[in-house]
Amino acid sequence: MNDTSSGLPQLGQWNDMADVQRLQEKQLPQTVVWAARSPFYRERLNSGALPTTAADLAGLPLTTKQDLRENYPYGMLGVPKERVATYHESSGTAGRPTPSFYTEEDWVDLAERFARKWIGMSPEDIFLVRTPYALMLTGHLAHAAGRLRGATIVPGDNRSLAMPYARVIRVLHDLGVTLTWSVATECLLWAAAADAAGYRPDADFPALRALFTGGEPLTDARRKRIMRIWGVPLIEEYGSTETGSLAGECPHGRLHLWADRALFEVYDPQTGAVRVEGEGQLVVTPLYREAMPLLRYNLEDNVSVSYRDCACGWGLPTIQVLGRAAFGYQVGTAKINQHRLEELVFSLPDKYGVLFWRAKATPAQLRIEIEVPDEHREAARAELAALVRTAFGVDSDVAGLSPGGLVPLSVLTSMSDVVKPRSLFGPDEDWDKALLYY
């Protein structure tokens, strides 16, 4: 955790935020020089002296996702192409992509930030990486961090026919996987797949010691449910393809911004005001990013940042990622948001076995579907409808579906036939698979 061989700041090397701010101010001029090498920032910074302090930097306009799209592919690149180690694009990009470039040196910073897990990562660990590798940063980031700490990596990928859920469970069990990285929903899908394979998640995977998750909003109720199911800590991570890891969880369950490696601001899109803390959209300036420096990049994520002390002693600001908490759909006189609705679903008694749900909100009605065993269906339906009524003041149509109604059993148990392209087939073979591999 405190390896200083890279020369980058490490946890424990400062006493308070004043020390962290001195680290920021020392590195910022170099960051701006790197930025000025890219076509985009060369034009933005050419009107005067380069910013050298955080106060100077505040005079620059925010960099937006649209700026990245409009400067695709190389307008944000600040190093010669031959120095680029990897290229990535974020998920969910509509239309023109948002490009991200990293050098080998950038990757040292990326891997170290992700590896700041309070539970530790070591050569004794077998680490299942179960997030996408294609174009996004997330799978490669966890892979690099695990290798940095000497762990054995199981590159499980996601959305891949080569790694169906039945195979995930086999690997988790047979290899004695100790750590995993995925979105939180995966942990519930694994639990269902383990049950389908005849395993108990909290008893039949004794090597497992922690679940690392990120990439989607996670309510406290769902988090606690996952931990009860698996019997191990769930440790959150926050970041993006454009920036890498921005915050990690301390032993006291709070997400801390890596302020020794980046500058953070909070932007209020309603007023245009920018503050160091409070609620708004997170603005970040990575301090050790050379390939594609970003100055005051607005992630557009709704967050709440605080500088109150934490018992962990890390001396770093904390962040709550609000995500869609403030976003919702109108049903009658109520605004229904996913965060609150998820809290209600996962506050149902564990004995009901509800893991999967979905809802549709229209101005006239809120319809909710939950997977629930037959023997608990009526009780679960009635209790959830009552919880919704109390929380939102509206009636809801709650439907109880038999297990498999939302996540088919075949998804949890099948093994895909992944084949390589071929052109010659025998008399009893299906030659419609010619040239196809899936």
Image: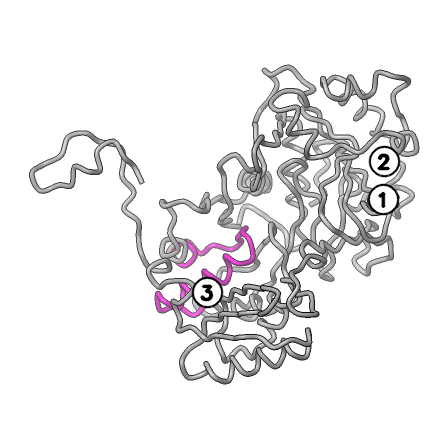
Q: Return the residue found at the far left.
A: 427
* Lateral position of residue 391 relative to residue 226, left or right: right
Of the two numbered discs 3 and 2 in the rendering, the one whose residue sits closer to the viewer: 3
The answer to whether residue 149 is above or below residue 251 is above
Q: Residue 269: image x %, image y %?
A: 80, 45
In the image, is 301 to the left or to the right of 378? right
Residue that label 3 marks: 191
Name the residue type under label 2.
Leu
Q: Nearer the viewer, mark 1 or mark 3?
A: 3
Query: Mark 1 vs mark 3: which is more N-terminal?
Result: 1
- Disc 1, SS: loop
Task: Categorize mark 2 by other alpha carbons within 10 Å: few (<14), some (14-19), many (20+).
Answer: some
**Looking at the image, which residue is at 36% across and 67% down?**
196
- Distance, label 1 to label 3, CA atoms, is 41 Å
Q: Quadrant of residue 76?
A: top right
- Mark 2 or mark 1: which comes first in sequence? 1
Q: Nearer the viewer, residue 5 or 36?
A: 36
Residue 14 got which mark?
1
Quadrant in the rendering for residue 233: bottom right
Q: Position of residue 244 (x, y in %)?
A: 65, 39
Label pair 2/1, CB-CB below 8 angstroms: yes
- Image quarter of residue 348: bottom right
**SS at mark 2 in the image:** helix
Image position of 281 (left or right of 73): right
Q: How is the image coloured?
A: one colour
Over which residues does the magenta segment extend? Answer: 171-200
First in sequence: mark 3 vs mark 2: 2
Amino acid beneath label 3: Ala
Residue that carries the numbered disc 2 in the rendered image: 23
Question: Would you say 136 lies left or right of 15 here?
Answer: left
Q: Are marks 1 and 3 in contact (CB under 8 Å)?
A: no
As helix, strand or loop, the secondary structure at mark 3 comes to helix
